[in-house]
Structures are given as structure tokens and as C-alpha cells.
Image (cartoon, rainbow, N blue to C red):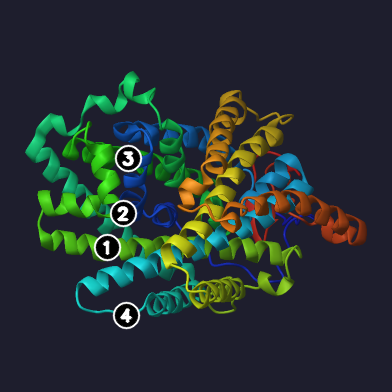
Amino acid sequence: MSRTSSPSAPPSAGGQLSLSLTTPKIVFLIIAAAAPLAAMVGTVPLAFALGNGPGVPAMFVFAGLTLMCFCVGYAAISRRVVNAGGFYTYISCGLGRPPAVAGGLIAVVAYNTASVGLLGSFAYFAQLVAASHGLDLPWEAWAAAGLLLVAVLGYRQIDLSVRVLGVAMCCEVGILLLLAAAVLVRHGAAALPGTSFSPHTLSGSGIGVSMMFAFISFIGIESAALYGEEAHNPERSVSRATYISISLIALFYGFISWVAVGAVGPHSIRKVAGAQLGDLFFSLSDDYLTGAFTTAMQVLLCLSLFAGWLALHNAANRYMFVLGREGVLPRVLGTAHARYASPYRASLTQTAFSLVTAAVFAVAGLDPYLGLTTSMLGLGTLGIVFLQAVACLSVIGYFWRRPDGHWWRTALAPALGFAGLAVATSLVVINFDTMTGTKNPVVDSLPWLIVVGAVLGPAYALWIRSAHPERYARLAGVETRRGEPVEFAGRTVTEAMPTRS
């Protein structure tokens, strides 16, 4: 069969990424980005204290169902379009190139700032844990050590990162399941109180804040599409990995937070969580396990944060790689390493951005957690949830006039996903000061960067169309024919249905 190249397929001059990822490996990358242990230790106590207390487990279930609707449409389009551009490519397919450029720029900002946010969180907790065991080093030292390791792993082939992330994920999930088992052994069925899902609890105050924290804990579940060019069977691996990841995260977060409610007591959880915050799960470990397990949990917390940091670093790299390859960002970013087949220049750029940002906060004497983490992770979270909502609209737009559209997969499910994610975006904006823990006017103004990207992106795309029409024609576009192999970013796949965007 002859090879058909599309005039709007991404150029392959920059090199091809390695084809080393399978569905389980992509699942590791996604769940590691969500950092399960870090979410339980750092986010869930805040949701208990500031939200609707014992109703938090139900909010995880709601967030999971909403994101599953998002996933239905996301999976449908991922089977048609294989590209490392993620949101950027999908938005182009459904809404056009100008909105896609805006989405790509917002994604670069969101994933880069989220990565820096986890740098601060890792350095902060590593300092605390090490100091409690006699090794007292400044947070800057831990940040530098972590950044060096992230830089090395990001520079190399992604298979090495997957091995590190897989070990981290298994360890952090394992210790939380041990804690849950100990609570269940002591309390039996009472460890899973029905109060968490009662109408009275779910109609109480604070439900919006709990919902916001629940959606925050799923950050990274959409990143499967970024690895499509590196998957052996992208048409199946991307959709399967996304379904599996959302299901596992929703069930796991809902179950562990439900057990925590049972361990503390439904009527006490809000007060106890407010008093202990980040120490809540460590206190439960002391009570239901042993001090040795608590020490292990503290170490694994740092490992969880590092794993999430590395996963977001890899996601940011892929966006910069694709946007560089297509000339939206400097083309130097769109080059794959000759030996490792990795987006090494994008990785080095992300490392440099992290280094400069962390250095600015350090020189200013700001706290690595309350300053660096909350502001950068807050902005990244807002950008990613916003892009998830826009992606739902893109799926509807892409399949609107196509013969392979489906009333549920490509219409109703994405519409429901958009509704839930639009609510989540609004909650993040309204409660941004709660999420970041500060009322600093500079921090509170960060959401405007998303607005700036949404305005300047289309303007930049229209300028490219006017000044460089040939380059504009290659932006985030794909064209395929029935039954023929089509070149996507330098590799050949077979598409069952004709597409054009």
C-alpha cells in the first residue's frame, strides 16, 4: 500500500519521538501526574476542613463521573487523531486553528507553572521530612537536587521516566491501601459511613469548595493524548489509558477519603482536619499502623511529589515540542534527540524556566509552599481544567457533521462533561484565594493570564495566516483517507474514516 502524506500533517524534520509506550506505561504516567499520596495528604484535609466535611468522598465520585463523560469524547477523537499536541491538536480539529493556538499557549503556561508548583511542594516537604530525621538542609538544596534528577530523566527516553514513575505509584498506593485495611479491620462496616453520601450532607455548605478540590486532584488525567506519537498502538492505547486512569483515580480517592471519614468520625472530620491539615494522614498512620509506617509514608510523600513533578515536566515538554515543531514557538524546541528520541531541547527549556522561577522566589525570601507552590499550582490547575472544558466542545464540533458521530460518545457525553468542567472552572476562579491560601493581589490576578492567552492566541494565529499562509496551513491539522496509511509527525498509521481539520 502506498504511503500518503498530508499537506497539513505535522512536519517530521525535527525527528521522531521514540515508540516505546504501551497502555500500562501511559497509565503510570497519568496516575503519577495526579500524585495519589500527595493528593490525599495535601488536598483532601483542606477539602474536609473548608468544604462539606464528610461529603468529600461523594465529590470525588461526582468529579470522576464528570471526567468520564469528558473521557468518552476525548477517547473518540483520540482514535481519529494521533499527535503529541493534546489539547492543541484536538481544539484545532473541532474549533479551528486560531482557538487551537490559544489552547496550545495556555497549555504551555499551565503545565509549566504546575510543574514549578510541584517543585516547590517537593522541596518544602523534603526539607521537613529530612529535618525531622536529623538532616537539616535548606529547601533550595532539595529543589536543586530534584531539578537535576528531573532534568536528566526528562532529557532521556521516556521509558526511563516510566520505570521511576511506576515504582513511585505502586509504593504510594500500597501504603494508603494498608492504612485503609487497618481502619476496616478495626471498625468494620462503620469505617464506610453512609453519611458521606446522604442528601443532607450533600446539600450542606461548602459543597462548591469540596468539588473544586476534587477536580484539582484529577489534574493530569488528560495527558494520555500527549504520548500518542510514542505509543505502539495509539488508536487504542490513548483511550484505554484515559478510561483506566480516571476509573482508578476516582475509585481510589473516593475510597481512601471515605475510610478517613470513618476513621475520624463523620461529625468530627471537619474539625480534626482543620486542626491537623497536612498531618491528618500521618496521625491516622500513627494510630492505625505504626511509627515506622508513618516514616515510610513521609518519605513516599516526597516520592509522590517528585513523580507528579516529573510527569508534569514530561507533559510540558510535549506541548513545547509540538508548538516548536510547527513554528508557534521557536522551532529549536521542536527537535527530537538523535539517540534518545526525546524532546530534549523542550526539556532543557522547561528545566531552565523552573530554575529561574524558583530562584526568583528564593531571592525574594518567599515560602516555597505558601509562595511558590500555591500560586504556580493554582494557575496550572485553572488552565488545565479550562482546557478540559474547551476540549469537550471541540469533540462536539469535530464530529458534528461527520458520518461516524454518535449521540452519546460524541454529543451528549461531551456536553455533560463540558457542563461539569465549566462549573469546576468557575469554582476555581471564585475560590482562587482559598486554593492558593493568600489574598495577595498579585497572586489573585494570575487567572488573568488565561484570559490573555485566550485573546492573544487567536490574534497570533491570524497574524501567521496573513504573514505565513503555508505555515498556518500546517498548524495542528490532519487529513486522512479511508483505509490508507497517513503520516502523523513522521510516522505512518491507518485511519478508518476520512477526516479533515
Residue 469 visible (yes or no): yes
Residue drawn at the location 24% of the way across and 38% of the way down? 269
Q: Where is residue 103 in the image (x, y as percent from the top left)?
A: 68, 50
Residue drawn at the location 46% of the way across and 78% of the way down? 152
The residue pinned by badge 4 equals 137
Task: Specify whether 217 is left or right of 111.
Answer: left
Q: Position of residue 428 (x, y in %)?
A: 53, 42
From what the image shows, is residue 78 above or below residue 229?
above
Disc 3 and disc 4 in contact, CB within 8 angstroms: no
Question: Which marked residue is nearer to the observer: mark 2 or mark 4?
Answer: 4
Residue drawn at the location 71% of the way across and 66% of the way down? 325
Q: How far apart are marks 3 and 4 (CA)?
A: 32 Å
Question: Quadrant location of residue 249?
Answer: top left
Q: How far apart are marks 1 and 2 (CA)?
A: 8 Å
Q: Distance between the residues labelled 3 and 2?
A: 16 Å
Q: Which amino acid does label 4 sit on?
A: Leu
Q: Answer with mark 1 or mark 2, whichever residue precedes in sequence.
A: 2
Q: Is mark 1 on a helix, strand or loop?
A: helix
Question: Quadrant location of residue 12?
Answer: bottom right
Disc 1 and disc 3 in contact, CB within 8 angstroms: no
Q: Answer with mark 1 or mark 3, whichever residue precedes in sequence.
A: 3
